[in-house]
Image: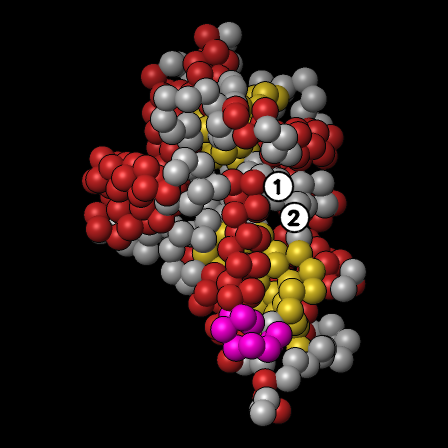
Amino acid sequence: MIAASDIRDPGRIGVILCNIGGPSSGNVAVVQAFLRNFFSDPAILPVNPFLRWMISRKIARRRGPESAKNYAMVGGRSPILDWTETQRRLLEERLNARGDGKLYRCAVAMRYSPPFTADALDLLDREGFREIISLPLYPQESGATTGSSLAEIDRLIEKMNFDRGVRFITKIGEVRDFAEHPLYLEAMAERARDGMLEMGGGRDLHILFSAHGLPKRFIEKGDPYQKRILATVAGLVRLLGVADRHTLAYQSRVGPEEWLKPDTSAEIDRLAASGVRRMFVVPVAFVSDHIETLHEISIEYKKRAREKGVLQFECMEGLNGSLTFVRALEQIALAAIAVA
């Protein structure tokens, strides 16, 4: 017999906010565990399982100590969970303030560090939120990010329902992309305007859009990521009015294979050599600050830029607790629910 508490209630909707995750401390073992999880994902490293197991551990051993030092320089841990939790709380408050007769519960599902996807599903299940939508916090769809998170949710829902012999949990909607959502673009533009103003503005301030890199083989196989990055950048160029003073590059390259170009570090060199002395970096593939913005851009790239003669080099603050971004997430979530 199914208990009354086990019956799905369509008036209770769960929203799973997916993100990549990050180490909860700068401890080498914690950082290595995150790296192992990351490179164990077949969406990231599409080789046979045993080889992937070996490679993921080799990479974690080699990169773990250096990565731990980097985290020590930005507060001793990744802030991505804190900011995602802030976004979760604010979104849940907005959804429940609508007074539409529904009760909403938002949960965080990190892909490679706690709380994992299974933790988010367990939480929603225990509280009776068994009709859910998946909302990955990756603005531009890619199989390596959006696809991996959505596949993990689907896999675990199927397993939970199969184990119980009853269809307790139902996914009623999912979000694959919000690269051109008007409020997302406006939230980004607000952050960029604030940063540009703090730098003093001016026509000589070059805007460097930096997106997380992706191996070129993904694009050759039809991954939409690069096209969606271009769509976001086009929207921001329009809102910021920087059509004549911007470039786009890709950061965080790993391994020997060919990645999307130009590389951000190489683009900094090129711009500096051409006489650019003031640069403002707008990270376009992230919705919160983490190691790629706080260390790679704000420390590594800044040092490189200064060595090349750049006088001013700053990075835009992440969306983090932006209320405009939370309004965007509200509209995005409601649109996904509406198609159910």
User: In the rendered image, which quarter is residue 142 located in?
Assistant: top right
Residues 311 and 110: in front is 110
Query: Could you say whether the residue bearing mark 1 is in a helix, strand or loop?
Result: loop
Q: Position of residue 286 (x, y in %)?
A: 53, 42
Q: Position of residue 316 (x, y in %)?
A: 51, 38
Q: Is residue 13 visible?
A: yes
Q: Which residues are magenta?
A: 160-168
Secondary structure of the residue carrying tag 2 is loop
- Residue plotted at (56% across, 72% down): 161
Residue at 67 percent of width and 25 percent of height: 242
Separation (CA) of disc 2 from disc 1: 6 Å
User: Position of 61 compared to 91: left or right?
Assistant: left
Residue 165 falls inside the magenta stretch:
yes
**Residue at the (71%, 79%) spot, across then down:** 11
Looking at marks 2 and 1 on the same chain, the residue that comes earlier in the sequence is marked by: 1
Q: Amino acid at mark 2?
A: Arg
Residue 212 located within the stretch drawn in magenta: no
State the quadrant of the C terminus: bottom right
Quadrant of the drawing holding the N terminus: bottom right
- On residue 264, the disc is none
The residue wearing badge 2 is: 176
Under mark 1, the amino acid is: Glu
Location of residue 224 with respect to 27 vertically, above or below: above
Q: Is residue 334 left or right of residue 144?
A: right
Q: Which residue is mark 1?
A: 141
Residue drawn where x is 37% and y is 21% of the image: 256
In percent of width and height, residue 108 lies at: 50, 62
Q: Can you see residue 281?
A: no
How packed is label 2: few (under 14 Cα within 10 Å), some, or many (20 or more)? some
In the rendered structure, are the residues bearing label 2 and label 1 in contact, judged by CB atoms less than 8 Å apart?
Answer: yes
